[in-house]
């Protein structure tokens, strides 16, 4: 009999799991997806043109809260967990819910989801969101270009809009961000690549994306997101760990898989890391992956205009997912506030409105930082209103994109940037060169 499957997701890996493991296969039928983590991604349909001829009506996407009822209503045989950046305790909670409803529970397969490329693949992944993948990916791209390679980056999916229109997306110019109706979260990942002249692809169908990227690439650079596994089989697998969060390399899914399978483990933020925490992470990494090469790096922050910060009462805007999914208590903006002598960091919570207020209700541990959430026009407007309504002298923008380009900030503000620098010899640059020569 054909197994009935439900895939738990968050508008990204869940679709990739469907495409690689279930689409066009007869032994199982996906009855539904459930969605969580990201607002406004449920109550949709995975469209028929992406799902294939076996699904002429597409596949419905429901709220994760509806999972027990869906299992019972449809007689689901197996629930497949297919999203990331969660603790293993969280995964076990979902297992209990699925099994209590009467279904088998499994985690998405690793090897079956990694497609083969005709070109060399360098993957940059992490054990948690907020480890510093973005600047590491940019550093790797620079190294590859210095070797005369044509680099095409492919980013982990963030398809929050029209799924059919987002099947294959190519970004080669800033204007493409508007063309593809990108959210702040998407722009944060694509814009830095574009500004350094790297073509970047993303979307929904990652085999179709890969085949297009291969046409213009010497090397495929997998820009991993949300501490997920690579969607392509890597020739060089780099995994970042964060000595500011010792133990997380053991405790989070599927970041631990990234640590277990990596060829290279990169310790970032060494300039501000506690030595004892570094030792803890080193011991854990050696337990998980005794053969991986360890390298060390730092990501110093620089303010475009330090005078905006010095002696001022500042509102600090940080990368949204780093504070929410990543659970970080501070980011580049806070480091800049301390470095450049801010008088006071303003608590944004008295000024939050709309969906930004809802974000704080869902993630109360965020505290006195403002996450740059922008998963849609409404959330971006609420972010703009929150910033401009705050009682502060100035705003520190610690996001990977130029936030003032996409929302109006009617207060003095300065942007904080950060790039990866080697902290060890060999550093990541030499390691990449040696692997691909």
Image: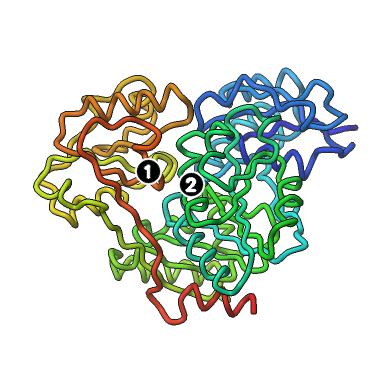
| Residue depicted at x 69% and y 23% | 45
At 48% across and 27% down in the image, what residue appears?
376
Q: Mark 2 and mark 1 in contact (Cβ < 8 Å)? A: yes
Residue 183, which numbered label? none
Residue at the image position 72 percent from the left and 17 percent from the top: 73
Looking at this view, is 73 or 203 the one in front? 203
Q: Please, is residue 395 above or below residue 146 in the view?
A: above
SS under mark 2: helix
Residue 3 is left or right of residue 317, and the answer is: right
Q: How many marks?
A: 2
71 in relation to 27, above or below: above
Counting from the top left corner in percent of width and height, residue 125 is at 54, 57
Q: Is residue 81 visible?
A: yes
Q: Identify whether 3 is placed above or below 289.
A: above
- Label 2 Cα crowd, 10 Å radius (few <14 / some 14-19 / many 20+): many
Q: Quadrant of the C terminus?
A: bottom right
The spot of residue 193 in percent (x, y) is: 51, 53
**Distance in Å between CA atoms under marks 1 and 2:** 9 Å
Q: Name above or below for residue 46 compared with residue 106.
A: above
Q: Is residue 96 visible?
A: no
Q: Is residue 344 left or right of residue 56?
A: left
| x and y, in percent, of residue 386 in the image | 28, 26
Give the quarter of the image for residue 391.
top left
The residue that disc 1 covers is 402
Please name the residue that numbered disc 2 is placed on. 191
User: Is tag 1's residue or tag 2's residue first in the polypeptide sequence?
Assistant: 2
Say what secondary structure mark 1 lies in: loop
Quadrant in which the N terminus is drawn: top right
């Amino acid at each position: 009999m054909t197994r009935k499957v439900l895939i738990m997701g968050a508008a990204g890996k869940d679709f990739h799991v469907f495409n690689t493991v279930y689409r066009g296969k007869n032994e199982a039928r996906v009855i539904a997806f459930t969605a969580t983590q990201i607002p406004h991604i449920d109550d949709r349909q995975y469209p028929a043109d992406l799902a294939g001829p076996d699904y002429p009506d597409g596949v419905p996407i429901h709220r994760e809260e509806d999972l027990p009822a869906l299992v019972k209503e449809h007689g689901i045989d197996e629930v497949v967990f297919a999203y990331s950046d969660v603790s293993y305790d969280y995964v076990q909670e979902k297992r209990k819910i699925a099994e209590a409803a009467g279904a088998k529970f499994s985690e998405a397969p690793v090897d079956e989801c990694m497609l083969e490329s005709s070109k060399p693949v360098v993957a940059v992944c992490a054990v948690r969101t907020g480890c510093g993948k973005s600047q590491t990916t940019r550093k790797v791209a620079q190294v590859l270009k210095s070797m005369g390679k044509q680099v095409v980056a492919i980013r982990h999916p963030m398809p929050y809009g029209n799924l059919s229109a987002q099947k294959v997306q190519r970004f080669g110019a800033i204007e493409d961000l508007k063309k593809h109706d990108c959210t702040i979260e998407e722009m944060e990942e694509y814009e830095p690549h574009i500004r350094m002249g790297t073509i970047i692809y993303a979307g929904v169908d990652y085999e179709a994306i890969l085949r297009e990227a291969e046409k213009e690439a010497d090397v495929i650079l997998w820009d991993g997101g949300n501490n997920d596994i690579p969607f392509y089989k890597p020739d060089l697998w780099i995994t970042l760990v964060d000595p500011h969060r010792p133990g997380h390399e053991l405790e989070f899914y599927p970041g631990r898989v990234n640590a277990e399978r990596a060829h290279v483990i990169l310790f970032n933020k060494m300039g501000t890391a506690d030595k004892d925490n570094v030792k803890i992470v080193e011991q854990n990494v050696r337990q998980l992956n005794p053969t991986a090469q360890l390298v060390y790096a730092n990501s110093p922050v620089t303010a475009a205009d330090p005078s905006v910060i010095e002696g001022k009462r500042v509102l600090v805007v940080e990368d949204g997912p780093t504070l929410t999914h990543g659970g970080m208590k501070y980011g580049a903006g806070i480091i800049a506030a301390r470095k450049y002598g801010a008088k006071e960091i303003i608590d944004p919570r008295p000024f939050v409105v709309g969906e930004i207020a809802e974000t704080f209700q869902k993630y109360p541990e965020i505290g006195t930082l403002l996450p740059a959430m922008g998963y849609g026009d409404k959330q971006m407007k609420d972010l703009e209103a929150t910033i401009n309504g705050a009682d502060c002298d100035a705003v520190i923008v610690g996001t990977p994109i130029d936030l003032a380009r996409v929302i109006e900030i009617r207060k003095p503000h300065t942007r904080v940037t950060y790039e990866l620098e080697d902290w060890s010899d060999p550093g990541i640059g030499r390691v990449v060169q040696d692997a691909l020569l």
